[in-house]
Image (cartoon, helix red, strand yellow):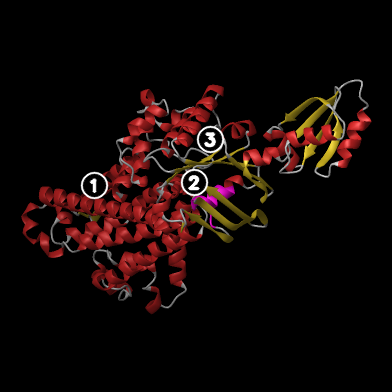
Amino acid sequence: MLLRAELRKILPYRTVWVILLLFVGLLAGFVSVGSNVQINGQQLGNTLYAFPELWPRLAYVASYFNLLLGILLIILITDEFQFRTFRQQVIDGSSAAGLVQGKLAVSALLAVFGTLAVLAVGLFFGLTRSPETFGRSSETIGAVPLYGIQALGYLALAALLGFLLRKAGPAFLAFLLYAWLVEPLLRFATPDHIDRYFPVKIFDSLTPTPGQELLSTVTGPSTALLPPQAAPIALAYIAGLWLLSYLLIRSRDL
Amino acid sequence: MAVLELDNLSKRYGGTTALRGLTLQVEQGSVYGLLGPNGSGKTTTLGLALGVLRPDGGSVRWFGQPLSSQSKRRVGALLETPNFFPYLSARQNLLLAADVKHADPATVDTALELAGLTARQHDAFRGFSLGMKQRLALASTLLGSPEVLVLDEPTNGLDPQGIAEVRELIQRLAAQGKTILIASHLLDEIEKVCTHVAVLQRGELRTAGPVRDILAASDRVVLRVEADLNPASLLHALGQLTWVSDVRPETGGGHSAVLAPGHTPAELNRALFASGVVLAGLEVRHRSLEAQFLELTK
């Protein structure tokens, strides 16, 4: 019932489809032009799409597009404040927990969509540009669900800011500033053994930069946690962020 | 049985007290009018009763229980403005509301018909006139056939015909035994449909009770004597009666007075006759709710 009500709001909403198409289009476009990149005078070419490296590469690229999913969720949450529909749903029988669960279900749908998009883009480019390596595709497929957890993480942060600020503009700004500026600055001022546990850092650790091993030889070893270490902490952050959203909604007037 | 009990409810917005210690009971089957000037706390009262505002003190009970999702689904409510998704059609909005209310989606057709929006059911809500939006909101409150209706200014934005239709609808629903709580500043409307009324002013309850009691408390009895009789004898006779007060001359001749509760015009007639004053005319003048309201909120 909860999910059906959310689908009734989302499916006819053009903005949702525009942003989801943009997500897939930008991801596929970015991946397709990647082969033209030249390094040391050589085009990367189809080696870029070779399994098993393709999945971690793709997950890393897709992590940048989580912001689009976050912005979409912020729109869906702040719309409900603007249209006073949260208020009406509470009048009609929803509880504060029901409102938050509805958006949690939407965030899960968006994360599943993002994960499936990564899977589809990977299969398409892998099979068309580097089919001979397909046999090794399952070796690193674990990077895709890790990307899904990361998407859930960014969405949980976006949801909290949407519930907190209630207006789309300030919530977008807070989301972008926190992910790109505030937390990196805080981390800069915090000792390395602590800053790797910051939420956005934990989420980003799930999709490490490709060729991190190579970079480490130049910049020193990365202090970030390995993806399997970061995953349970990321899930705990996700639960905590949604719990905060619930406490916020429960304690305020609608 | 009380359908809704508000006990010592208080609400502050920052430094402003919007509601102060409101205690009110709405009995089953009554049509309860909540009256008050703008900013008197009507919408705050309903917002607290419906659980969208958090009280700073006091409690709300529906059907003898604290507010819950179950109790809310027995109540259909329209608070302040029609709240719908602008990009969804009238039909899509009602289907969504039916899901939230756990109401049968099949009732959406009846609701659309009742709102007179069947022909426009596939049009987006954002293109509707204020009156159409209000009618859709009223139709939405009836989804799932709730036992209680809470209507905040239900005739807002409606034309005279629409207002009459809403009045008729309220009377029809009341006749079916539904309890209706209605906030309005249209006193005429309240007087026409309500059985009970509460008057709020600056967040405080001024009076509450059955409409006829509130109006009867201020009914005046107009007395006329034959032209050849000295009016002083009437005034003297009235002065002897401890249960008659506020004697005033009326324009156009005669006097009027207020009777203490429990005393009837017939009793007055008998008492005056016994003191030798024969009345040529005796008339009970009901005050309108408007006059009473203005008096109370002066």
Q: Looking at the image, is A184 positioned above or below residue B27?
A: below
Mark number displayed over residue A28 = 1
Pointer 3 residue: B154
Which chain is disc 1 placed on?
A: A
First reached walking from the N terminus: tag 3 or tag 2: 2
Span of residues in magenta: B44-54
Do marks 3 and 2 share a subunit?
Answer: yes
At horizontal 73% and vertical 41% (from top left) the residue drawn is B263
The numbered disc on residue B28 is: 2
Q: Do the residues labelled 3 and 2 touch (CB within 8 Å)?
A: no
User: On what subunit does the disc labeled 3 rest?
Assistant: B
Q: Residues within 10 Å of mark 2 (few under 14, many from 20)?
A: some
Residue A251 seen in this snapshot? yes
Between marks 3 and 2 in the image, the one whose residue lies nearer the viewer: 2
Taking depth in this image into account, of B168 and A171 the one nearest to the observer is B168
Q: Which of A172 and B206 is in front in this view?
A: B206
- Identify residue type, mark 1: Ala
Q: Main secondary structure of the magenta part?
A: helix
Q: How far apart are marks 3 and 2 (CA)?
A: 20 Å
Amino acid type for the residue under numbered disc 3 = Pro
